[in-house]
């Protein structure tokens, strides 16, 4: 599964050298193009704000019709098990092939107890559960979707990785930390 995803990305980039060189805005409106958005999840210790895990590249823009590969490298070795209404976000949703890859291995869901974060774009029906990273290491999670709808969509992490008694305040409710925007230009 891993090699298939990698191959598709490589072919798409080869077909669009201007994009690969960063000479054009991602996608440049071409309906068949394929872009990769790379994000990193840092712990509060790494970003200098204790208890505030952060996603870098928290907001990005793609074009309607584009195939978008989301690559998230997480360094967070602490879990934030999903609870209540959020437990459904342990399953991959809206991804090409019905799966994400975790360190290259096709995965359709992550057990609640092993979840550290989620990358969830409710408005696009897309969800990636992010499992806990090994202590001192990282985990790489990749999934691909097609941006079918234009608009500005807020993404959220639905694992209670923030502050407060619910774990849902602090980083969880602050734009640029555990929530951001995915803009799909029509
Ligand atoms: Cu989170």
Image: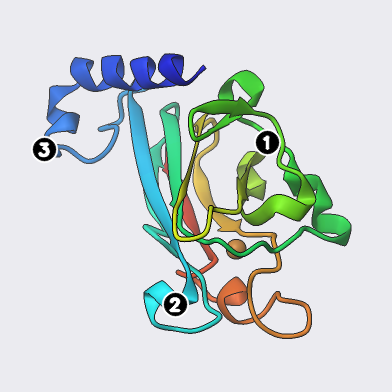
| Above or below: residue 179 compared with residue 33 | below
The residues tagged by marks 2 and 1 sit, at their Cα atoms, a distance apart of 28 Å
Residue under the image location 37 percent in, 16 percent down? 8
Residue labelled with disc 2:
45
Q: Which of marks 2 and 1 is in front?
A: 2
Occupied quadrant, residue 126: top right
Give the structural element (helix, strand or loop) at label 2.
Answer: helix
Mark 3 / mark 2, whichever is N-terminal: 3
Q: Residue 23 carries which label?
A: 3
Name the outermost residue toward the front.
135
Q: How crowded is mark 1: few (under 14 residues within 10 Å), some or many (20 or more)?
A: many
Mark 2 / mark 1, whichever is N-terminal: 2
Residue under the image location 16 percent in, 37 percent down? 24
Occupied quadrant, residue 157: bottom right
Name the outermost residue toward the right.
84
Q: Which mark is residue 80?
A: none
Using the rendered image of the protein, determine whether residue 119 is visible from the camera's viewpoint: no
The residues tagged by marks 3 and 1 sit, at their Cα atoms, a distance apart of 33 Å
Residue labelled with disc 1:
92
Q: Which of marks 3 and 1 is in front?
A: 1
Residue 59: give x, y in percent of width and height. 41, 57
């Amino acid at each position: 599964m891993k090699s298939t995803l990698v191959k598709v990305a490589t072919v798409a980039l080869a077909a669009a050298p201007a994009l690969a060189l960063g000479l054009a805005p991602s996608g440049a409106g071409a309906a068949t193009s394929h872009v990769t958005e790379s994000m990193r999840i840092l712990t509060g210790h790494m970003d200098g704000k204790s208890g505030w895990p952060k996603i870098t590249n928290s907001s990005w823009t793609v074009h309607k019709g584009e195939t978008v590969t989301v690559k998230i490298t997480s360094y967070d070795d602490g879990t934030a098990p999903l609870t209540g209404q959020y437990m459904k976000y342990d399953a991959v949703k809206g991804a090409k092939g019905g799966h994400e890859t975790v360190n290259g291995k096709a995965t359709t869901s992550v057990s609640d107890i092993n979840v550290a974060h989620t990358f969830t774009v409710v408005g696009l029906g897309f969800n990636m559960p992010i499992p806990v990273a090994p202590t001192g290491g990282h985990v790489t999670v990749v999934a691909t979707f097609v941006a079918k709808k234009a608009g500005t969509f807020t993404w959220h992490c639905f694992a209670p990785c923030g502050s407060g008694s619910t774990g849902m305040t602090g980083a969880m409710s602050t734009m640029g930390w555990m929530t951001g925007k995915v803009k799909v230009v029509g």
